[in-house]
Every structure is written in C-alpha cells, then in structure tokens.
Amino acid sequence: MALEKQVSIPAPLVNWLRAAERVVVMTGAGVSAESGVPTFRDAQTGLWSRYRPEELATPEAFGRDPRLVWDWYRWRRDLVQKAEPNAAHHALVQMETHVHQMTLVTQNVDGLHRRAGSRSVIELHGSLERARCQGCGQRAQEWPETDEELPRCSLCGDLLRPDVVWFGEALPRAAIEQAAAAALGCDLFLVVGTSGVVEPAALLPYLAKDQGAVLAVVNPEETPQSEVADFFLPGRAGDVLPVLIQQAWPQA
Ligand code: BV8
Ligand code: ZN
C-alpha cells in the first residue's frame, strides 16, 4: 500500500470549498508534471536543452525558423499524446460534479483536463492539439507533418502555426474575458501548479482576492500568489487535490 503522503488540509478551507457556490480553479504546468509532461521551468531535455521556451514560444522565433518551432511543438505534442491525465486532473473532474458552478481556467496547452473529462475548460493560451493558418485563420485539428514540408492551410495554402498564444501575443478575447468574469464573481479561487509570473493569467487570482474571494494556492514551492493567499497548501497537485476532494465530499 503506497504510503499516503501526509497531506493536511486546513479545516476552514475544506468548509469554504464545501460551502462555495462559485469556484474558479486556475492551473499551470505543475498540474501535468505528474503525467510526465515537463513544466516550463524544468530544464528542457534532449535536443531542446539548448533552447529556453521563452525563445521558442514567440512569433519572432516562428518567423525566423518555422521548421525549428514546428519540430518543438511536434515533440511536445507527441509527448503529450503518450501522457495520461493524473490524479490531479481526475480530482478536478470530481470537484466539478460537487461544486454548484466551477470554472476551470488553464494556462496549459496539453489538453489533459479535457481528456480527463473536465467539461468546461477555458484554455487561456490555446492548445497544442490545434493549428491555425497564419493567413486566413482557418483552424485545423489535424495536418500533415512531414520532415520536408511545413504544414500548410488546406484553404489558402499559407503556413499553419500551432494554435497557442506566444509571448507578446494577445490572449483569445473570449477566454480572458470569461476567465476575468469568473474571477470577479467567485467565492473561492484555487491556483494549482503555476509559477504565477506570466501575465495576464497571473493577475486573475488578485482580481478574485480583491473582490473578496478566498484564495488558495497548491504548489510544492511558494509563488507570488501564495504570499497573499488565505491558504497555501505546499505539495504536489496529485497528492493534495484528491485529499482536498475527499475531505470536502467524503464518499457517502
Ligand atoms: C501579452 C503557450 C500583450 C505557449 C504560454 C516583459 C517583457 C516582455 C513581455 C512581458 C514583460 N512583462 C510582461 C510581459 C508579458 C508576457 C509575460 O507575462 N512575460 C513574463 C515571462 C514576464 N506575457 C505575454 O506575452 C502574454 N501576452 O502580454 O500580450 C498584448 C496585449 C494586446 C495585444 C498584443 C499583445 C502571453 C503570455 C502567454 C505565453 N504562452 N504558453 C506554449 O505553451 O508553447 S506561457 C507558458 O508559461 C504557460 O502557458 C504558462 O502561462 C507560463 C508559465 O508556465 P507555468 O504553467 O506556470 O509553469 P512553470 O513551469 O512556470 O511553473 C510550474 C509550476 O508548477 C512551478 O511553480 C512548480 O513549483 C509547480 N509544480 C511542479 N510540479 C508540481 C507543481 N505544482 C503542483 N504539483 C506538482 N507536481
Ligand atoms: Zn489559410
């Protein structure tokens, strides 16, 4: 029997979660770490070790060398397709069934929340699973990946690009507006697995706290948001979230 990590959840947080009408959960790469998907801060491995994500996830990098950027995204997509959602993703699916109104906002582009069964997921930074034409904007769920040819739009023939938000690009308007509205109207805002430095996503927890929501942070390390949070739960998402759900809604 695997030794249950000693996770202690403050009783007031359990009570808040049980009583909350509207809960927002914002996730980052840390929630997929236990699925084997490297976080942004993990040193890039293998042939990607010489690049920093901030250098590759930019329009400039794509303009300069679309083949390099596509190879990085193909490598990440292959890795994610082989990954499985972990206990943290499944705990959030369970939470959704208990909370009156839960909004899941993710910075992740790996699609694992949706694969785990989360229904309403706001993808602030897009998704690896989609490409879009940099010319006409047409989206594609699949496209030919060959070492020779770069993926091209079936409609206008222009280059396809990953349908993610790069540094320096605006977030999808609907996504950030929905996420901000949810933050402004929630009783409890839970931040899980993000270093909380990339804006504007990193501002959402403060919107919630400033309007009176309870703010809780789950992360093995302190983050800017954990400094101002009402509750900081040090630990891995896959250890903490299942215990939080179990204590808030003990199986009848
Ligand atoms: C914008 C998609 C304006 C792509 C991503 C100064 C100079 C230049 C720019 C800026 C600047 N100051 C601010 C900016 C803006 C910039 C920004 O914030 N930069 C930062 C670096 C300072 N933001 C932007 O550019 C945004 N756009 O501002 O546009 C604009 C407005 C109008 C019109 C035109 C333009 C766009 C930002 C989106 C970038 N795209 N991803 C892709 O994935 O390829 S960002 C990417 O990194 C993620 O999506 C995420 O948002 C971000 C950070 O990743 P995290 O998820 O936090 O992961 P990280 O690795 O950092 O941390 C992991 C955490 O997990 C750690 O805390 C760790 O402790 C924890 N952890 C580890 N294991 C576990 C765990 N937690 C729980 N359980 C575990 N087991
Ligand atoms: Zn096109």
Image (cartoon, helix red, strand yellow):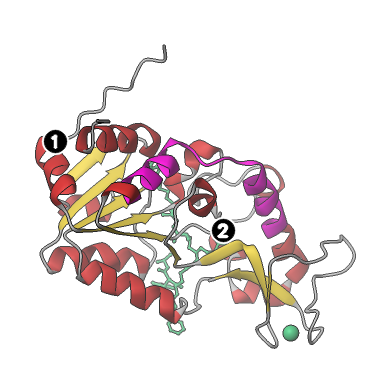
Residue 234 lies, with reference to residue 158, above or below; the image says above
Circle nearer the N terminus (2, 1): 1
Residue 161 lies, with reference to residue 138, above or below; the image says above
What residue is shown with label 2? 53
Task: Point out the image quarter for the C terminus.
Answer: top left
Task: Residue at 49%, 77% (x, y): give it.
Answer: 168
In the foreground, 91 or 148: 91
Quick one: SS at disc 1? loop
Residue 136 lies, with reference to residue 186, above or below; the image says below
Q: Can see residue 38?
A: yes
- Left of 116 or right of it: where is 46? right
Work out which residue is located at the far right of the displayed protein and give it. Answer: 148
In the foreground, 208 or 140: 140
Q: Position of residue 219 (x, y in %)?
A: 32, 42
Residue 18 falls in image quadrant: top left
**Magenta segment boundaries in residue numbering:** 72-96
Mark 2: is the Cβ under 8 angstroms from ligand 1? Answer: yes
Identified by mark 2, the residue type is Pro
Work out which residue is located at the far front of the displayed protein and give it. Answer: 252
Residue 86 located within the stretch drawn in magenta: yes
In the foreground, 1 or 147: 1
Q: CA distance from mark 2 to mark 1?
A: 36 Å
Q: Position of residue 2 (x, y in %)?
A: 41, 15
What residue is shown with label 1? 10
Looking at the rendering, the quadrant in which ligand 1 lies is: bottom left
